[in-house]
Amino acid sequence: MQCTACGASYDSEAYTCDACGHAVTVVDGYPAFAPELAHGGGGYESKLFAELAPLEEKSFWFRARNELILWALRRYRPDVSSFLEIGCGTGFVLSGIAAQHPTARLYGSEIFVDGLSFAGARVPSARLMQMDARAIPMREEIDVIGAFDVLEHIEEDVDVLREMHGALKRGGLLVISVPQHRWLWSPADDHAHHVRRYTAGELRDKISGAGFEVLKSTSFVSILLPMMVLSRLRMRGRTDDYDPIDEMRMPGWLNAVLYRVMRAENALIRWGLRFPLGGSRLVVARKVTQGADEPPG
Ligand SMILES: [Zn+2]
């Protein structure tokens, strides 16, 4: 951890600075690095996560996305010893990583402290904290940082990428997913408080600009894109009654069919196919430090 008072580095477990004695504020039982923002959600997240948590394990979208993330870890950093998820939500991704990498030290963060209890219940081994991704209190400590459908919520996404770069060890891995294609913008994005949907080039430029080398960049939710476009078109013009949870409640048979389609797509991605179009984009990138003792790339 990096002390927010004096900037010194200290042991991650203690949350108290050895150099100046500054102790991290605790909010609702969690270390809080940006306590002034901890209750900014006004309970909204807590309510949303309570509804979301039981649906995620069944949802074709969350399951398929988890499988893609877990593949990326197996493929690019099978020996991960520390993993930080920014915006860990209910801990569904962390639980998958805990199962696949039982010896890795897992960290999860949320800006609103309300969300953390769900992740804590699901992944008791994870070290959870409240923090602002624009000021990550870690320096060269982490093997892999993940942020899954998080960057599109943050105006200062470039600052967040730079902070992730600083928190990663030399050669550390970044795994990111975001919603893609500006033309797919719909009331669902408004409702989710998205700041943007990305283009492939924009995301690549921002990640490269923050000091990373992109190892893999692919669309996903590509085969289902036509269905997604139809659903979004149907939604246009009705901004009032949109409920994101509603969209996840679908007949079991349909969810099962969509899951099989997504699994087939994941297999194609694993074989090296890169879809040009898709509702989302996955990027895997490696920290490259342009230091004197280290050649770039
Ligand atoms: Zn200090």
Image (tube, rainbow, N blue to C red):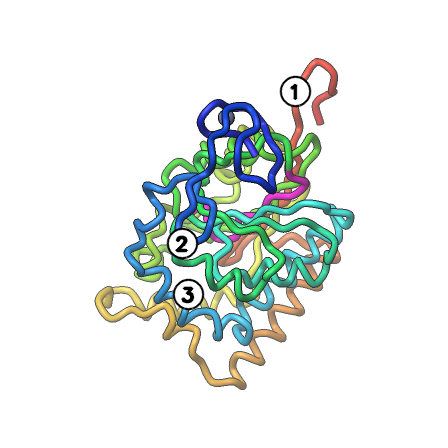
Q: Is residue 143 magenta?
A: yes
Task: Check disc 2 and give the amino acid type.
Answer: Asp
Element marked by disc 1: loop
- Disc marking residue 28: 2
Please name the residue shown 70% across and 33% down the image.
Answer: 171
| Picture coordinates of residue 150, whole percent (x, y) | 46, 49
Residue 230, above or below 196:
below
Q: Quadrant of the N terminus?
A: top right
Can you give x and y, in whole percent of width and height, for residue 224 in the image?
Answer: 53, 68
Asked if the magenta segment contains residue 139, the reply would be: no
Residue 284 appears at what percent x and percent y? 64, 44
Q: Amino acid at mark 1?
A: Gln
In the rendered structure, which disc, 1 or 2, sits on the residue that comes first in sequence?
A: 2
Q: Is residue 200 visible?
A: yes
**Which residue position holds label 3?**
49
Q: Secondary structure at mark 2?
A: loop
Give the residue type that dot 3 points to: Phe
In depth, the one of 55 and 105 nearer the eye is: 105
Dot placed on the residue nearer the N-terminal end, 1 or 3: 3
User: In the displayed structure, would residue 238 be above or below residue 18?
Assistant: below
Rate crowding at label 1 as few (under 14), some (14 to 19) or many (20 or more) other CA atoms within 10 Å: few
Query: For this view, does 198 lie left or right of residue 105?
Result: left
